[in-house]
Amino acid sequence: MSTSQLSVYFFLQAGLIIVACRLVGKLAQRLGQPQVVGEMIAGVMLGPSLLGAVLPEAQAVLFPKATLDMLYVGGQVGVGMYMFLVGTEFQAAHIRSRYRSAMAVSWAGIAVPFLLAFALAPWLQRVPGLFADNARFLEVALFLGAAIAITAFPMLARIIQERGLAGTPLGTLALTAGAMDDAAAWCILAIVLASFGGSWEQAWLAIGGGIAYLTFMLLAGRRLLAPLGAQVPAEGPLPTPVFAWVMATFFLCAWAMDAIGIHAVFGGFILGVCLPRGALTERLRERLQGVVVVVLLPLFFTYSGLKTQLSVLLDPAILVPAIVILLASFGGKAIACWAAARLSGESPRDAKAIGALMNARGLMELIIINIGLQAGLIKPGLFTILVIMAILTTLMATPLFNRIMRDRPAPALPATGGPPA
């Protein structure tokens, strides 16, 4: 397919994807769900699971295989910029204020999923269609553990913000535990991918490079970025030179993390965390949020949906493992975080709320399983199971949290919303 043909397809696909995500997202909002839930479902609907099953010829014409790499790159830009925006809203004070309780909740939310993963790995490794044939036991167990342990940190932050819980003991504890959970899961994923690639040199490069990048950004990066914040007036638009420098820095940070084998999203997120707070981050969110959330991120959802094949669940050999993985994912994370919160002295209501929030996977799950699929570590069967798990846990999070916190009425979900989960 020529370059000009690819551009024709890209414009058509982008238009269709945006329309589908907005329509299904609007329906999700009417049902009391965040916009992101509808967008995740819309991505699956455009793939072989619905459009490909009902109108296979139309689906093949609209999304030929030659165009998928183009969608992948667009989706990666979207998810990287999205995590950058999440980073600009992250408050480091959360970690300092509730460190001990958050550590207990976080470690419980990591330890129990990994114990379940190690218990299930010997069986799941022998099930065809889940893991690569050359995947070793430790790689299978660690990847599955990371997939079950991951938390939809952005969605968690969004719910807490909408409910007016930011800065409260509950909100601070949940945000801190979620951030620690995700950091641990991503570090383990980097080790798994390096091991699967057969190069422990790559593993050490990923871990050492990630630590070096984080240390540099926290110690020196903040000071180097501070002059950018001083150039932004309290009122008025974001100066174009400042915007250009921030975007150039974002792409270089994303490149650095991608090149060493971690993932571009970490580069963007840490940069967002280190940017000076105030007018700079506010103007950046105003300028980028609409394009990222409405245009770029749906490309990622659709790419994931095009790789999801719900028909594989009709195979009894896949259906039984799917049920077991879903039960382990739902119960392991929620119960562990609830128990840890109660043992840390949290009230019964707050402990239940933390369990409900920490159990949601959202976009973070889609990112981690896309990385696994792209690396060849997992096969379409497990990819589909984990997509369903991401959607179901995200669907459950808001209603469960609202029911637990029903004495605090939640505000209506915004029409466009901020960054989704």
Image (cartoon, grey):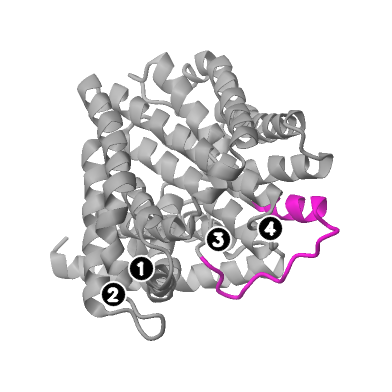
- Answer few, some or many: residues within 10 Å of disc 3's Cα (few below 14, many 20 plus, some between 14 and 19): many
As helix, strand or loop, the secondary structure at mark 4 comes to loop
As helix, strand or loop, the secondary structure at mark 2 comes to loop
Say the numbered circle drawn on residue 243: none
The residue positioned 43% from the left and 39% from the top of the image is 369
- Answer few, some or many: residues within 10 Å of disc 1's Cα (few below 14, many 20 plus, some between 14 and 19): some
Which residue is under mark 4?
165
As helix, strand or loop, the secondary structure at mark 3 comes to helix
Q: Is residue 50 visible?
A: yes
Which residue is under mark 1?
13
Q: What amino acid type is highlighted by mark number 4?
A: Leu
- Queried whether the magenta region covers residue 224, the answer comes back as no
Q: What amino acid type is highlighted by mark number 2?
A: Gln
Which residue is under mark 3?
36
Q: What amino acid type is highlighted by mark number 3?
A: Val
Which residue is under mark 2?
231
Compare marks 4 and 2 and give the one earlier in the sequence: 4
Q: Quadrant of residue 379?
A: top left
Give the Cα distance between marks 1 and 2.
39 Å
Compare marks 3 and 4 and give the one earlier in the sequence: 3
Give the Cα distance between marks 3 and 4.
21 Å
Which contiguous range is marked in magenta? Answer: 395-418
